[in-house]
Amino acid sequence: MKKILAIIKPFKVEEVKDALTKINVNGMTISEVKGFGRQKGHKEVYRGAEYQTDFVPKVEISIALDDDMVDEVVKTIVETAKTGKIGDGKIFIQPIEEVVRIRTSETGSAAL
């Protein structure tokens, strides 16, 4: 099993969620986060005054899935979230040792 952690632009969330649902991703957790990468924040204008924003708003999507779905999920996220501009985000793939469904005590893939 693997955990996919994708950091994407906020306006792409619904599009990515819909695309993942179409390829039978059964669940995901979405969190609003802030951070920066190579772009080191950006400048904004508010009431005529320009100021530097160090942390850029992003959305973090977390998905636990079987190993055989990883390539398709990553491909779907990249194709859907990509704008071609700086700050499109990143995808991290991590191993999961075990999963337990609290309600039924199911473990492993059955708990997903």
Image: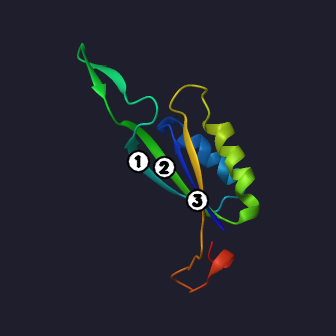
Residue position marked by numbered label 2 in the rendering: 60
Q: In the rendering, at what x and y percent does residue 1 appear? A: 66, 68
Label pair 2/1, CB-CB below 8 angstroms? yes
The residue positioned farthest toward the front in the image shown: 38
Q: Earlier in the sequence, mark 2 or mark 1?
A: 1
Q: Residue furthest top?
A: 48
Residue at 29% x, 24% y is 52
Q: Quadrant of residue 12?
A: top right
Residue at (64%, 62%) from the top-left corner? 26
Q: Quadrant of residue 34?
A: top left
Tell me where residue 90 appears, x and y as whole percent: 56, 42
Count every numbered label the image shows and give the total: 3
- Circle 1: element type: strand
User: If the image is split into quadrants, where does the C terminus sit?
Assistant: bottom right
Q: Could you tell me residue 80's position as x and y percent? A: 65, 38
Judged left or right of residue 86, residue 16 is right
Question: Quick one: 67 or 25, which is closer to the camera?
Answer: 67
Judging by the rendered image, the residue that carries numbered circle 3 is 63
Determine the residue positioned at 61% across, 44% down: 16
Residue at x 72%, y 64% (from the top left corner): 67
Three-letter amino acid code at disc 2? Glu
The Cα–Cα distance between marks 1 and 3, rounded to whole angstroms, is 15 Å
Q: Residues within 10 Å of mark 3 (few under 14, many from 20)?
A: many
Q: Earlier in the sequence, mark 1 or mark 3?
A: 1
Q: Secondary structure at mark 3?
A: strand
Q: Mark 2 and mark 3: span between their CA atoms?
A: 10 Å
In the rendered structure, which amino acid carries the disc numbered 1? Glu
Which residue is denoted by mark 1 in the rendering? 32
Per the image, label 2 sits on a secondary structure element best described as strand
Q: How is the image coloured?
A: rainbow
Tag 2: Cα neighbours inside 10 Å, few (<14), some, or many (≥20)? many
Amino acid at dot 3:
Ile
